[in-house]
Amino acid sequence: MERGKRPPKRKPITEEQVHEMMRMRRQGRSIKAIAQAMGCHRQTVRMHLKERHADILADEARKQVLIDELRNHFRELAGFATVELKSHLRASRTELPGSGPEMLMPGRPISMEGTLGLPGPGSSNHAAEEWARMYELPSKEQHLMQALREHTKDSPLWSHWDGWRREVADYETKSRELFEWLVDKTEAELFQKIDPQYLGLIRQWLFGNLLLRANDAGYEYERLQMKGGVLTSAGREIARGGKLLYDYLLGILKEAEQRSEWGALGLAAKQLKENQLELRRIVSEIDSALDGIELMRAFPGRCHLCPV
């Protein structure tokens, strides 16, 4: 350098360069290594990192929160796959007097004794609840189902799952159409014949009876007990209204039997009974695939529920 000339001024450090320093520091790089990589003095690096110390701490805290949330997300998906999702495919057993819902323990096979895809014999309430267990995913579980599929889209699970859906599609569709008809039928009699307070229980009683009779032509509709203007089913109060309401409800059941959906539902139920070997093969494959998912500590890709 010529005598009397000053060294050229270094260009000021840009915001992008500061962020790069912070990134390298988070990776564990030393001050000296960062300075060499950035082409500046160590004191410059140290000064900028000191100024951004609070930002670095905040970034680290956010990073740890996201790691914890992602772990919880994967844990929730694995739990859903091995418990809730398996529960929807579990065979429906005969309801025993005074028995509560049977819990599905992790590792327990899906394909248990009983008829797959159909509610087992029991009260109308049991039949309606079993139908809902098999064919109604709660809103939260619908989101988890979609997330699990997004994370594991290449898993053989989904070809088996889609096979299951095809096997039960006709029964599910026809039974749902019958339920929608019941909803319309009872909606028209609100406040006149039906107290809105009991509407859900009445629909459940009607739907459960229709399912049981469609699944077994010899089934006799469940009798309601009448006492003091109260109608009870298996000891459970389902309506107030006495004999007039009881006769009206029986009339709905008889009317349902004249509808095309009724005959189609009976045929679909018969088909499901005849396809039990195929259904059990499918759920055995699903069971194995779900057990594999339980062993995964993380899932590939991202989904709409991912916290990062």
Image (cartoon, rainbow, N blue to C red):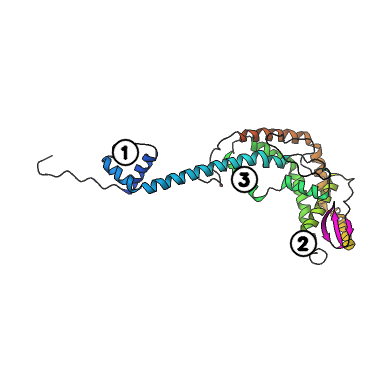
- To which residue does mark 3 refer? 144
- Closer to us: mark 2 or mark 3? 2
The one nearer the camera, 109 or 61, is 61
Count up the numbered dots.
Answer: 3
Q: What stretch is highlighted in magenta?
A: 224-241
Q: Main secondary structure of the magenta part?
A: strand
Task: State the image coordinates of residue 231 (x, y, percent, origin top left).
Answer: 86, 58
> In the visual, does 41 lie left or right of 176?
left
- To which residue does mark 1 refer? 31
Q: Does any portion of residue 149 appear in the rendered image?
A: no
The one nearer the camera, 275 or 285, is 285
Q: Does the magenta stretch include residue 230?
A: yes
Per the model, the C-alpha gap separating discs 1 and 2 is 71 Å
Task: State the image coordinates of residue 33 (x, y, percent, origin top left).
Answer: 31, 36
- To which residue does mark 2 refer? 197
Task: State the image coordinates of residue 245 (x, y, percent, origin top left).
Answer: 86, 62
